[in-house]
Amino acid sequence: MARPRSEDKRNALLAAATQVFADDGINAPTARIAKAAGVAEGTLFTYFSNKDELLNQLYLDLKSELRGAMLTSYPRAADVKQRARHVWLAYIDWGVVNPHKRKVVAQLAVCDRITAGSKAVSAGAFSEFNAMVEESMAKGVLRDQPPAFVGAILVAMAETTMDFMGKEPAAAERFRTAGFEAFWRAVATS
Amino acid sequence: MARPRSEDKRNALLAAATQVFADDGINAPTARIAKAAGVAEGTLFTYFSNKDELLNQLYLDLKSELRGAMLTSYPRAADVKQRARHVWLAYIDWGVVNPHKRKVVAQLAVCDRITAGSKAVSAGAFSEFNAMVEESMAKGVLRDQPPAFVGAILVAMAETTMDFMGKEPAAAERFRTAGFEAFWRAVATS
Amino acid sequence: MARPRSEDKRNALLAAATQVFADDGINAPTARIAKAAGVAEGTLFTYFSNKDELLNQLYLDLKSELRGAMLTSYPRAADVKQRARHVWLAYIDWGVVNPHKRKVVAQLAVCDRITAGSKAVSAGAFSEFNAMVEESMAKGVLRDQPPAFVGAILVAMAETTMDFMGKEPAAAERFRTAGFEAFWRAVATS
Amino acid sequence: MARPRSEDKRNALLAAATQVFADDGINAPTARIAKAAGVAEGTLFTYFSNKDELLNQLYLDLKSELRGAMLTSYPRAADVKQRARHVWLAYIDWGVVNPHKRKVVAQLAVCDRITAGSKAVSAGAFSEFNAMVEESMAKGVLRDQPPAFVGAILVAMAETTMDFMGKEPAAAERFRTAGFEAFWRAVATS
DNA sequence: AATGAATGAGAATTCATTCAT
DNA sequence: AATGAATGAATTCTCATTCAT
């Protein structure tokens, strides 16, 4: 695979894949993705050597974007609960603003085509949050658990919260707040 | 009367589908399922008119089995926390004993081929648990939330817990207990 | 193949086949025919050893019915033109009253599954009309042609006439009469 | 630019379809057609989106070829009977030279998979012959009938004639001539 | 590098026919 | 004889990937 010439085209393919996968599931044909990206069928394969690589790159890309959203305006100096709330709200907002991306990550996460390597890379990208968790545990603010477990509970509860925000838009704000408080009670000491 | 349609064969097909889908994902060919069930390719279609129906029936079947597991020895007379713990443990045990089934339900739940009808039927099967939640809220034991939200949080946290039990078998017992306590703090008042 | 018990059932199958083939073409599944006839799938094969036999029997049956219609009230003593007109009108009326049967015979006639034997048997059933033609030629009323050719022209023109009667029902009567006159000019001497 | 779609390959597929359908009927598998055309099974579907489209295109193609044959050396200035004889002979010759094509058009014409649209397009292609008929009626040369009816009678009689030419090759020339004279008496005034 | 036609191994069904009941 | 479940070959169409242009 030669070095692809255009980063734009790569991004267009990833964006198109998100759209198409959100609409038709992960089995959607690569031809449809290429078309949605405005490139020829074969061109997709100069950017991704096969469909599995596209899937893995997309997974990494979306996870990385989510991490970026969480780090934007991250209040590094605030107390732990403030920082946790920031992460929670950033997650929720990203998911609400990008429902397609959220849906696709969910499908990718349970599909066998994402390699252990991709999952590890993605987990690594969130390690600074783990560090925050460890620090908090040391301070006694959080209950003693593997940091990854706390992170996973945040993700699980945030996903559940977003599902209900989507189902009952009128109560969205309530869910967002109540969800965080529930999370915090679940993991914090006091 | 010709040979009657066999409930055994139907169950064999459903069991085979679970195995095959757990190994190869939901796109696994129907031919492989039929073979695993020990019937001819065409026979699958006398029991399920098409693959989507197989998927939906399997979803319903697995959800129903999970509900059955939760109701076994359900301590109807015990206090709310005892009952919630029973449900939690039943869920966890079912998932740990039946990792294939758990994996397949997870894939079915995010795949577009499960109809809204199937999801509604399945949700209805768990309505008695919602009743328990409502009753508890009335008593002030649980915080005020839509009962379905509490149920969804239980599911989300239990799934997360099972993931970690699988990853760190040595700490499985610890996760099971700590997971429930976290859940209870998240939703209970005190 | 044992002797089938019920002539009624055989007729029901033939009638059902006519309906089903008219609606869905000659590839329609035997299962649909059996269902339309109110018998089980397998029962069809006690009356017809396979689908080709059903096709051939149906062809013969319909041709024979048509011949019967032509012979009903056949004016044996009338002059040739009167007799020819009788045949023409009987054909047209049969086709108009039984559009399904007409459609199915047309499909069977061009489909390779009707054996030469069936075609010969069917042709034989119309031999008395050929005799009339020969007699007329001897009298000099008809132009000298193979009798089967005259018969085939009658059929071809009658079919064309029925097509147009169907397309323009308001002019049906006109087509029926004009069609016969055209046929008569085509084959008669004067 | 990638390899352009090849008109040759399209024609090869159409020709192969004609052969295969003539031999085995219209249900012959697309795989056999592709093989006969020397292309891969999937390639057929880059030229025709599905089998029905192949059928319809073939119908149109063959009808168009027949029209072309009728127009070749068409004696536009000759009198009506000469022109009608030209059409008759062109039709017969085309049918005799191309028995496969004739057989396939016959099957397509009675099969439900040819759309009303295709039939209309094909009918339109023969409209100039209708014009000739109308002109002749105005002159009083032909009896007053819908032009399409006259055309349909020509077709019906020519088909019948070809059937008999095939059955009795020794008398072929006689049938060809006698057939036309019969047709002309059927439709002309004098 | 980009294109899109070509490929052929599947995939989900269908269906005539058989045969256990 | 009647039934309809079981069979598995056959069919249409799809799609990731290759490669000539």
Image (cartoon, coloured by chain):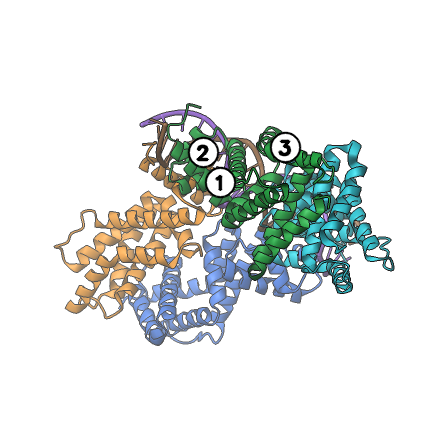
Chain colours: A green, B cyan, C blue, D orange, E brown, F purple
Q: Residues within 10 Å of mark 3 (few under 14, many from 20)?
A: few
Q: How far apart are marks 2 and 1 (CA)?
A: 20 Å
Image quarter (top left, top right, bottom left or bottom right) of the N terminus of chain A: top left
C111 lies above or below B177: below
Which of the two discs, 3 and 1, sits closer to the camera?
3
- Do discs 2 and 1 belong to a common subunit? no
Mark nearest the camera among 3 and 2 is 3
- For residue D121, above or below residue D69: below
Q: Is residue D19 visible?
A: no
> Which chain contains the residue that carries disc 2?
D
Number of marks in the rendered image: 3
Q: Circle 3 sits in a helix, a strand or a loop, which is it?
A: helix
Q: What chain does mark 1 sit on? A: A
Q: Nearer the viewer, residue D55 or A25?
A: A25
Instruction: Determine the residue positioned at 70% across, 36% down.
Output: A139
| Percent x, y of residue B122 | 69, 56
Which tag is nearer the camera, tag 2 or tag 1? 1
- Residue type at mark 3: give it: Ala
Q: Mark 2 points at which residue?
A: D40
Secondary structure of the residue carrying numbered label 2:
loop
Mark linked to residue A131: 3
Q: Sequence order check: which comes first, mark 3 or mark 1?
A: 1
Of residues D140 and D118, the one nearer the viewer is D118
Amino acid type assigned to the residue bearing label 2 in the image: Ala
Label 3 and label 1: CA atoms lie apart by 40 Å
Q: In this view of the protein, which residue sits in the foreground, C19 or A190?
A: A190
Q: What residue is pinned by disc 1?
A: A29
User: Residue D124 — which label?
Assistant: none
Q: Position of residue A24 (x, y in %)?
A: 51, 47
CA neighbours of label 2 inside 10 A, class few (<14), some (14 to 19), many (20+): few
